[in-house]
Image (tube, rainbow, N blue to C red):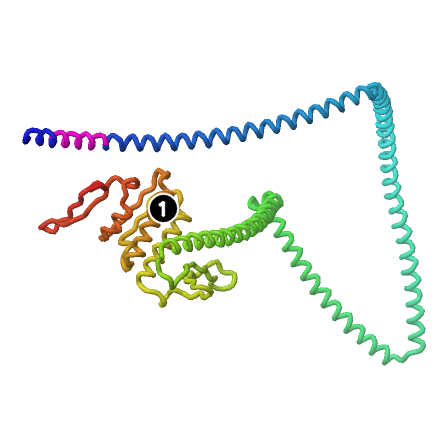
């Protein structure tokens, strides 16, 4: 009897060892099965897309066939209407018109040559006419001057015969003073003119220096550079305004997306009844400014209040974690590292369990991402058990201290 019991015990031990070996062999097979299922889904999606593309190509080919049939019918109608003979007739007419046009061009060139000769003759006649007009104007002016001189002499004789000597002397003195003033002004103008002429001569000499060579060309190049810079500045201003508007739209869109994720995570995680959800509001700091101040608001029914100074430490910690998770979900899709240090600080049991459930959902959503890693540092073993499930991780690290207060890091299996 004792031997039979020993045999049964040994058999059970062997079965248990086999079960352990089978269990260890099943794990990679399950992973391979999940990978094959994922490959099957990817291949199915790829085949569906290829089928849709072929269907779209088929519809395009059918449209092309219909269009070709329509063109064939039009060609047949064109051949039946005997428009080929009409086309040949029109081509012959076109050839005749081109020959006539060529003759007209030759005639036009001949007429242009005659017209240029006529214009040259007209310019010579205009020059002769100007010379004659200048001669006539000179003779007329000379006759007017002689006539005015004769009138002045007659007027002087009348003045001498009519006026007294004192009045004439006074007028003469007055006119002499005017003459002296005019002479002084004329001398001053001559001096100014001589200064200007000397400056012009000096500037002409300066312009002959090497530094002023091709001054017109350099001025033109500088002017082109200035105008190009002004146009580039205008283009940059337009680009800056467009970029500013795009950034404002992007900011608004991302804030809506972040608040949507925050609301969902809060409602899934928070177990209290005093706060329905929370959100982040941004206020611009001054008119036309792109700087914002951000506030965390809590919504209870129709009432909206700022969380600062109105919530407990646990609510603050939960809000901080949810906001960080929302920011990571929004901006860090290609970065797979999410690190949490003592996330259950000041959280009660229900809220800690809800936070663990939210992290499990995030791991479920990200399990297809190759570079995703969740790092959690915690003293809460219950929280670690809730998120440390076999389908999400193979082991965890326990940090303890020995009798010498040295840290010991041990890797432990999830089942342990």
The extreme front residue here reads 1
Q: Quadrant of residue 197?
A: bottom right
Seen at 33% across and 49% down, the residue is: 357
Seen at 14% across and 50% down, the residue is: 401
Q: Could you say which is closer to the camera, residue 24 or residue 140?
A: 24
The residue to which callout 1 is attached is 362
Q: Is residue 380 left or right of residue 72?
A: left
Please say whether residue 323 is one of the residues in the magenta stretch: no
* 336 relative to 172, above or below: above
Please say whether residue 17 is one of the residues in the magenta stretch: yes
Q: Quadrant of the C terminus?
A: top left
Q: Is residue 273 left or right of residue 74?
A: left
Q: Is residue 318 left or right of residue 382?
A: right
The answer to whether residue 42 is seen in the rendering is yes
The answer to whether residue 95 is seen in the rendering is no
Q: Position of residue 143 (x, y in %)?
A: 92, 58
* 54 relative to 393, above or below: above
Q: Could you say which is closer to the camera, residue 33 or residue 221?
A: 33
Q: Could you say which is closer to the camera, residue 235 or residue 296?
A: 296
Q: Could you say which is closer to the camera, residue 20 or residue 193?
A: 20
**Mark 1 Cα shell of 10 Å, populated few (<14), some (14-19), many (≥20):** some
Residue bounds of the magenta highlight: 10-22
Q: Position of residue 55 (x, y in %)?
A: 57, 29
């Amino acid at each position: 009897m004792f031997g039979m019991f020993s045999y049964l015990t040994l058999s059970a031990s062997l079965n248990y060892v086999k079960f352990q070996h089978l269990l260890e062999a099943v794990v990679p097979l399950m992973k391979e099965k999940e990978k094959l299922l994922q490959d099957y889904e990817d291949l199915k999606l790829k085949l569906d897309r290829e089928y849709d593309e072929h269907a779209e190509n088929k519809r395009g080919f059918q449209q092309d066939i219909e269009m070709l049939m329509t063109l064939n019918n039009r060609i047949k109608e064109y051949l039946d209407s005997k428009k080929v003979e009409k086309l040949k007739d029109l081509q012959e007419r076109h050839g005749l018109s081109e020959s006539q046009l060529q003759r007209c061009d030759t005639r036009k060139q001949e007429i242009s040559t005659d017209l240029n000769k006529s214009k040259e003759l007209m310019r010579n006649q205009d020059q002769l006419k100007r010379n004659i007009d200048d001669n006539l104007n000179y003779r007329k002016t000379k006759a007017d001057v002689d006539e005015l001189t004769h009138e002045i002499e007659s007027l002087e004789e009348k003045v001498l015969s009519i006026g007294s000597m004192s009045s004439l002397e006074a007028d003469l003195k007055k006119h002499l003073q005017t003459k002296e003033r005019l002479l002084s002004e004329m001398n001053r103008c001559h001096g100014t003119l001589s200064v200007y002429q000397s400056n012009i001569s000096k500037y002409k000499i300066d312009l002959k220096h090497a530094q002023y060579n091709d001054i017109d060309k350099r001025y033109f190049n500088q002017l082109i550079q200035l105008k190009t810079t002004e146009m580039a500045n205008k283009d940059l201003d337009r680009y800056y305004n467009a970029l500013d508007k795009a950034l404002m739209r992007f900011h608004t869109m991302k804030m809506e997306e972040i608040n949507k994720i925050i609301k969902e995570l809060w409602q899934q995680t928070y177990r209290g009844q005093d706060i329905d959800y929370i959100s982040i509001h941004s206020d611009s700091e001054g008119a036309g400014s792109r700087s914002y101040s951000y506030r965390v608001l809590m919504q209870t029914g129709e009432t909206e209040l700022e969380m600062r100074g109105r919530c407990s430490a646990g609510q603050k910690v939960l809000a901080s974690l949810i906001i960080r998770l929302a920011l990571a979900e929004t901006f860090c899709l290609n970065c797979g590292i999410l690190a949490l240090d003592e996330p259950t600080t000041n959280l009660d049991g229900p809220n800690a369990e809800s936070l663990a459930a939210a992290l499990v959902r995030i791991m479920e959503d990200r399990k297809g991402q190759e570079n995703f890693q969740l790092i959690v540092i915690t003293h809460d073993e219950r929280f670690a058990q809730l998120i440390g499930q076999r389908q999400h991780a193979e082991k965890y690290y326990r940090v303890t201290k020995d009798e010498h207060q040295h840290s010991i890091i041990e890797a432990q299996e999830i089942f342990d």
